């Protein structure tokens, strides 16, 4: 007799269905369900149902039965007031379910959940084994979720981080009156679970549930906030260290004629041409970025760090050209203006409640256009085109700073494991580093004073 895995997810939306604040969540739901139905190991699912007018109705299907709310939910149940977001699905086993939850489209939506859902003080999902002739119900799922909250992982209710074999769950009695049996449905089950409710936020038996973990559960908002701040600080430290390394390399190339001649043809303190090593130094960062974009998932933390430091050091060679071209005073002044602008834009990206994903797609298209225009301007130079490119560059990279900051914040919510978190921090720092450097270079076209 093959045991099957039941999975319930639960969250509370920031606004009722129909609000623009949660529309992104609603729009993504159909695609996520379609992806689940195509996923290996998927058996079936039941879900809350809403009409186009966002009217909630309690579904009654073979999988799910009469709809129920967990006791964590104290929101509305009338049309236009519902904020509960629940799913219930059935899988052949742990690995297929885990691959779906932490991969593909579902993982992308999971990374943005803090835009749509309130910070939870309860487990956001629960797993349990069911027999081949048992169909889980909403009432049963609520009981399992509350059991996990009260008692921590056990054979009765567990998580992807702390799992139990089907044999360990054998002999456990279904939570209510045989609910979920194919021959007996709970016709008069109350819409709330009946297990006595402990105060939300109470200390749980399993300390793993008190922090953000592989289960994707945030039961201690204070711990989550501390972790997020530490993550962002790590990102900014990497970025600042990368800028410092680039600055040191740039000054070393500028100050030493012998070093400068390794990369450039220098006459009278001005660069008049490039050497082969100079071209390599300028284009090598692009090759390294392409490498990590392809191999990111398989690279170790040490390898990612090595690539980051190599990119920032090589960028220092190309940035030394600014010191040859502009006065030191204008370079320092523009750098501090860039730093101030970066700080304001990054704070905006971190604090805004608006989802910047759509803006990011627009900026990416603008970036492609900017690159193409720059290539054309290299072969057919035009003063007007140069000015337009400079303005566009400032606007695009200003927007990317805010977008990338929000994206890094979202990636922290989706990451788990120390290695993964460190790699996410490095990649985030690299994105912000490139945004800063490009904004700095475009601002130099406006504010720099030539030697």
Image (cartoon, rainbow, N blue to C red):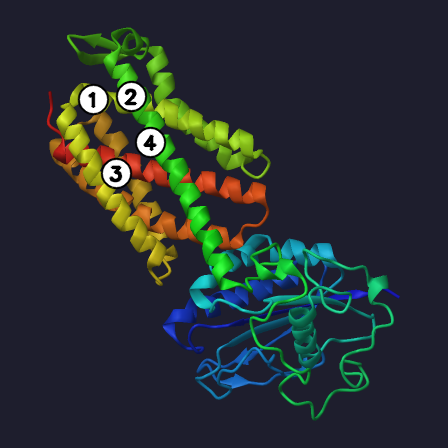
Upstream in sequence: badge 2 or badge 1: 2
Residue sitting at the far front: 203
Label 1 and label 4: CA atoms lie apart by: 15 Å
Reading the image, the residue beneath label 4 is 243
Residue at x 82% of width, y 70% of height: 131
Residue at x 64% of width, y 67% of height: 204
Q: Is residue 92 left or right of residue 442?
A: right
Label 4 and label 2: CA atoms lie apart by: 10 Å
- In the depicted view, which residue is nearer to us: 325 or 372? 325
Label 2 and label 1: CA atoms lie apart by: 8 Å
Reading the image, the residue beneath label 1 is 323
Q: Are marks 3 and 2 in contact (CB under 8 Å)?
A: no
Q: Label 4: how many residues lie within 10 Å, few (<14), some (14-19) or many (20+)?
A: many
Reading the image, the residue beneath label 2 is 250
Percent across and percent down for residue 420 are: 56, 43
Residue at x 25% of width, y 38% of height: 439
Q: Are marks 2 and 1 in contact (CB under 8 Å)?
A: yes
Upstream in sequence: badge 1 or badge 3: 1
Q: Is residue 343 left or right of residue 408?
A: left
Q: Nearer the viewer, mark 4 or mark 3?
A: 4
Upstream in sequence: badge 4 or badge 2: 4
Residue 389 in sight from this viewpoint: no
Residue 119 in sight from this viewpoint: yes
The relative height of residue 14 versus residue 38 in the rendered view (above or below) is: below
Upstream in sequence: badge 1 or badge 4: 4
- In the depicted view, which residue is nearer to us: 29 or 305? 305
- In the depicted view, which residue is nearer to us: 273 or 245? 245
Label 1 and label 3: CA atoms lie apart by: 16 Å
Percent across and percent down for residue 183 are: 82, 85
């Amino acid at each position: 007799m093959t045991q099957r895995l039941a999975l319930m997810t639960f969250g509370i939306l920031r606004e009722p269905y129909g609000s623009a604040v949660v529309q992104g969540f609603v729009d993504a739901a159909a695609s996520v369900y379609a992806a689940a139905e195509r996923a290996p190991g998927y058996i079936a699912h039941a879900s809350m149902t809403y009409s186009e007018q966002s009217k909630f109705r309690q579904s009654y299907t073979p999988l799910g039965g009469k709809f129920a709310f967990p006791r964590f939910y104290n929101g509305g149940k009338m049309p236009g007031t519902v904020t509960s977001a629940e799913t219930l699905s059935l899988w052949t086993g742990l690995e297929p379910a885990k691959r779906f939850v932490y991969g593909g489209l579902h993982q992308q939506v999971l990374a943005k959940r803090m835009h749509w859902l309130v910070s939870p003080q309860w487990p956001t999902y629960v797993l349990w084994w069911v027999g081949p002739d048992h169909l889980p119900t909403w009432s049963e799922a609520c009981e399992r979720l509350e059991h996990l909250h009260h008692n921590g992982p056990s054979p009765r209710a567990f998580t992807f981080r702390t799992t139990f074999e089907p044999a360990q769950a054998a002999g456990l009695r279904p939570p209510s009156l045989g609910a979920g049996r194919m021959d007996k449905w709970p016709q008069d089950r109350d819409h709330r679970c009946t297990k006595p409710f402990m105060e939300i936020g109470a200390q749980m038996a399993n300390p793993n549930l008190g922090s953000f973990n592989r289960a994707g559960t945030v039961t201690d908002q204070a711990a989550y906030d501390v972790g997020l701040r530490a993550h962002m600080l790590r990102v900014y430290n990497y970025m600042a260290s990368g800028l410092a390394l680039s600055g040191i390399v740039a000054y070393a190339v500028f100050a030493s004629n012998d070093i400068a001649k390794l990369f450039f043809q220098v006459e009278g303190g001005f660069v008049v041409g490039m050497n082969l090593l100079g071209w390599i130094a300028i284009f090598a960062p692009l090759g390294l970025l392409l490498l990590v974009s392809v191999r990111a998932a398989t690279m170790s933390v040490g390898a990612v760090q090595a690539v980051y430091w190599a990119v920032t050091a090589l960028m220092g060679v190309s940035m030394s050209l600014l010191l040859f071209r502009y006065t030191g005073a204008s370079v320092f002044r523009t750098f501090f203006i860039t730093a101030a602008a970066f700080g304001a834009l990054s704070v905006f990206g971190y604090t805004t409640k608006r989802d910047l994903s759509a803006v990011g797609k627009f900026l990416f298209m603008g970036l492609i256009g900017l690159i193409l225009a720059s290539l054309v301007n290299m072969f057919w130079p035009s003063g007007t085109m140069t000015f337009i490119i400079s303005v566009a560059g400032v606007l695009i990279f200003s927007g990317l700073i805010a977008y990338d900051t929000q994206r890094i914040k979202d990636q922290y919510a989706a990451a788990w494991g120390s290695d993964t978190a460190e790699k996410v921090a490095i990649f985030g720092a690299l994105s912000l580093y490139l945004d800063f450097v490009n904004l700095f270079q475009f601002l130099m076209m406006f504010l720099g004073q030539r030697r």
